[in-house]
Image (tube, helix red, strand yellow):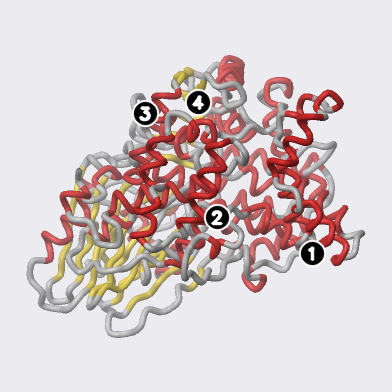
Amino acid sequence: MCGIAGFWGPAGQRGMRPAAQAMADAIRHRGPDDSGEWCDESAGVALAFRRLSILDLSPAGHQPMTSASGRYVIVFNGEVYNYAELRSRLPGCRWRGHSDTEAMLAAVEAWGLEAAVRTFVGMFAFALWDKQERELHLVRDRLGIKPLYYGRCGQYLLFGSELRALRAHPAFDAEIDRGAVALLMRHNYVPHPYSIYSGIRKLPPGTILRVKLDRELPEPRPFWSARAVAEAGVASTLPDDPEPALDALHQLLLEATRLRMVADVPLGAFLSGGIDSSTVVALMQAQSSRPVRTFSIGFVEKGYNEAPFAAEVARHLGTDHTELYVTPAEAQAVVPRLPEYFDEPFADSSQIPTFLVSALARKHVTVALSGDGGDELFAGYPRYSLANQIWGTMRHFPAAGRKLAAAGMRTLSADTWNRFFRTADVFLPERIRRRRPGEQIHRFADLLSEESRQAVYRRLLSHWDPPEQVVMGALEPPTVLTDPGRRAELSDFTLQMMFIDLVSYLPDDILTKVDRASMAVSLEARVPLLDHRVVEFAWRLPMSLRIREGKEKWLLRQVLYKYVPARLVDRPKMGFGIPVGEWLRGPLRDWGEALLAPDRLAEEGCLDHETVRRAWNEHLSGTRNWQYLLWDVLMFEAWLERQGARQAPSPEMLHA
């Protein structure tokens, strides 16, 4: 796990190495163990690298690395886990070390770039310079586990693992993209291929970008397509026969986990006690000769604490378990540093516990396995059944009648509805009285107004909808959530929702969160469930093996039950959350008030300050719970403050 950066500009330029060093130094946290630069002044290209030593700790693993023939130079972030197999398929090579990087270069020389990349099993983002053809290739792994940004600034093409690397180059000059801000307000993240800056892009997962400096940037071309995998999987669905499907999935997961346990440094795993992380830890322990190191974070707030469940699973499996109970003050202390850790505006509040568990694990290990991906592959999100239930009810009523009913529900404010139900609370179950029924009524009214099941799901996923109500002068760019042309051809609605999450929410929220939180403390996070062979197999499963007997992730649960009794893991999905809403009314109120000051918002001229202040005041008064919408705004404003508004930050600010 490392950080990469570089640029390509006019030939014959001087002073390239200091610029490359500055880009690498900006992402030192991604690789504190070593650094390197490679420059070719005659070509105007520079590659820079920061290393977190995981495999081949010797100097033979140093990057940038040149191929045996001297034709290719690479900087590579990630891990290719099947490097030993690649070496066995490349007889006659004279190996200098045993790093995966060297095996990758040899494969490229032997088979060509695209053919080689198709054989790689792992997570990777790399830049490959071809001296012979004078071409630069940027490549990102199939699922988008590792990040890669790129874009032209003046005469230069800049690229790097994080935006801060690009900002460190003297040529960087990019304005904030209001369309990207609109996307942030809808999603709580900026989805690929967009970034927060105009003209700077995220390389889409599973693609290769081939660059010639004297030409316009082409569109990246796929070497693996989630859409093709989903459509092909559904076209060749497996029989509804649990036993062979269970055996096949079990073996795939054992192999995926085994490969990700290879490291020359201490290794452990995150454990929440849920289905996904418990499965990964169980498979690790089954293949380990010693207790696996596991880590979990606990909270004193009721309803947010999964630590006791994780401890039970750890005791059953016999892991070497470490848990840390975090006080609200300790968790809140992380908040002002989030813009630094995440570098691009990002507003999934589970970023806080993810950072805390990463920091805990890093005290003991350098690599941690994570259970991400299970919900997207095995239909684990409760919103899938919720969307089906809502649309299943709505579609029986005419659209005009639904809109009329929605308008009627909105005639009373959410606070008025809440007061009405409080007066009738003696007749209502406690669980309903506590849920702010007025907000649920207004949200249901929004859903009633939609005219298709796809629009219902879009509404369920959206925060500010439409985001133009809060981002002034914005035109929201198309994404898979808003543009039907970007979706797979799938007849089953649940499969459609899973696909949308697989290509948007997973890479741009979940995997981004894990990457930035773990790399902020120089920890490598690996995700066995997202081995592309597991993904391809999962898309062949009939829905009856995903959801069965009222249980989501049914087949994955059966794998887990081989190791852990159902009673330890069968419980409602809790999520990895924190009580942001309460914090904003209490200890984080002054922080939020400073960021949302009317004069400040008006001077910046990006967000509609009246809309923002209305939501803020309603939240503070308790009349509405706008925690998710406000967290989007607050994370954007905190990022603006960190980066110095629209201007590129100085090196001093980057390293403050």
Amino acid carrying label 4: it is: Ser
Above or below, 28 relative to 159: above
Q: How busy is the neighbourhood of tag 1: few (under 14 within 10 Å), some, or many (20 plus)? A: few
Q: Which residue is mark 4?
A: 288
Q: How busy is the neighbourhood of tag 3: few (under 14 within 10 Å), some, or many (20 plus)? A: some
Residue 552's quadrant in the figure?
top right
Label 1: which secondary element: loop
Mark closer to the observer (1, 3): 1
Q: In the visual, does 188 lie left or right of 335?
A: right
Residue at the image point whose x is 71% and y is 33% from the top: 435
Mark closer to the observer (2, 4): 2
Residue at the image point whose x is 32% and y is 85% from the top: 215
Q: In the visual, does 266 lie left or right of 303?
A: left
**Inter-mark Cα distance, 1 to 3:** 45 Å
Mark closer to the observer (3, 2): 2
Label 2: which secondary element: helix
Residue at the limit of the structure toward the right, as seen here: 396
Q: Which residue is mark 1?
A: 491
Please name whichever residue, 477 or 202, is drawn nearer the observer in this view of the structure: 477
**Inter-mark Cα distance, 1 to 4:** 42 Å
Relative image position of residue 529 (x, y in whole percent): 58, 43
Earlier residue among tags 2 and 4: 2
Earlier residue among tags 3 and 2: 2
Above or below, 647 relative to 281: below
The reply to whether dot 1 and dot 4 touch (C-beta < 8 Å) is no
Residue 365 badge: 3
Please name whichever residue, 616 or 261, is drawn nearer the observer in this view of the structure: 616
Label 3: which secondary element: loop
Earlier residue among tags 1 and 3: 3
Q: Which residue is mark 2?
A: 187
Relative image position of residue 25 (x, y in whole percent): 20, 50
